Image (cartoon, rainbow, N blue to C red):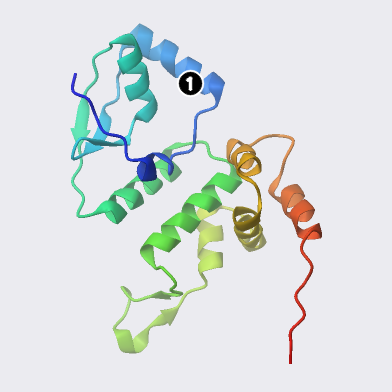
Amino acid sequence: MKTLKINKEFSELIPHLQPEEYILLEESIQKEGCRDPIFIWNDTIIDGYNRYQICKKHKIEYKTKEIKFKDNNEAKIWIINNQLARRNLSAYAKVELNLILEDILSPGQGYRSDLEPLSNLTKVNTSKEIAKQSKVAEGTVHKVKFIRDNADEETKEKLREGNKELSINKVYSTLFKFFKPLKLLR
């Protein structure tokens, strides 16, 4: 078994498994072997971190599947879309991944230049599109942005995990109390 590389920037895009989920995956791989390949790009894992870790720990054979990308951004887009398509993610995690995707696809842009010639650029309501893709209300996207920019990492991780004690609304309301509206200077 060859040693694969882990790119922290890639691995951080993938929501962590809950401890119970990890245990179940480990038991499954020990009983049945690693059924799904570990997806790689230039010997760097892009999907299958947990499978790889379990296989190395228990010396279990695994297969890899190489995917070609032109650059890191294309790899990140694949990783995010793959996660959005196959995981039971919390609303917070879905919005957060779609916000990262938005940053990759159009940093600082609100336009879709791939749709029309430059002279006919179409303004896109990105919050509305992210809400649609995440299957949440548009206001939730704004709350997630606020939480992403102002909450501590522990709180954000609990929201990603779908912790039953916290909700996007509860965290947003709590955080918002500590921020005073800015008065516009004239």
Q: Position of residue 29 (x, y in %)?
A: 36, 14
- Kind of residue indicated by mark 1: Tyr
Q: Position of residue 56 (x, y in %)?
A: 31, 17
* Quarter of the rendering containing residue 101: bottom left
Label 1 environment density (alpha carbons within 10 Å; few <14, some 14–19, many ≥20) = some
Residue extending farthest to the front is 185
Q: Residue at x 60, y 59 (%)?
A: 145
- Which of 98 and 182 lies nearest the eye of the viewer? 182
Where is 72 relative to 62, above or below?
Answer: below
| The C terminus: image quadrant | bottom right
Q: Residue at x 21, y 28 (%)?
A: 64
* Quarter of the rendering containing residue 41: top left
Numbered disc total: 1
Q: Position of residue 18 (x, y in %)?
A: 55, 26
| The N terminus: image quadrant | top left
Residue extending farthest to the top is 31
Q: Residue at x 48, y 50 (%)?
A: 97
Judge left or right: residue 131 versus residue 87: right
- Asked which secondary structure carries label 1, the reply is helix
Residue designated by label 1: 22
Judge left or right: residue 171 versus residue 105: right
* Quarter of the rendering containing residue 73: bottom left
Judge left or right: residue 99 versus residue 45: right
Q: Position of residue 53 (x, y in %)?
A: 36, 22
Where is 31 relative to 4, above or below?
Answer: above
Residue extending farthest to the bottom is 186
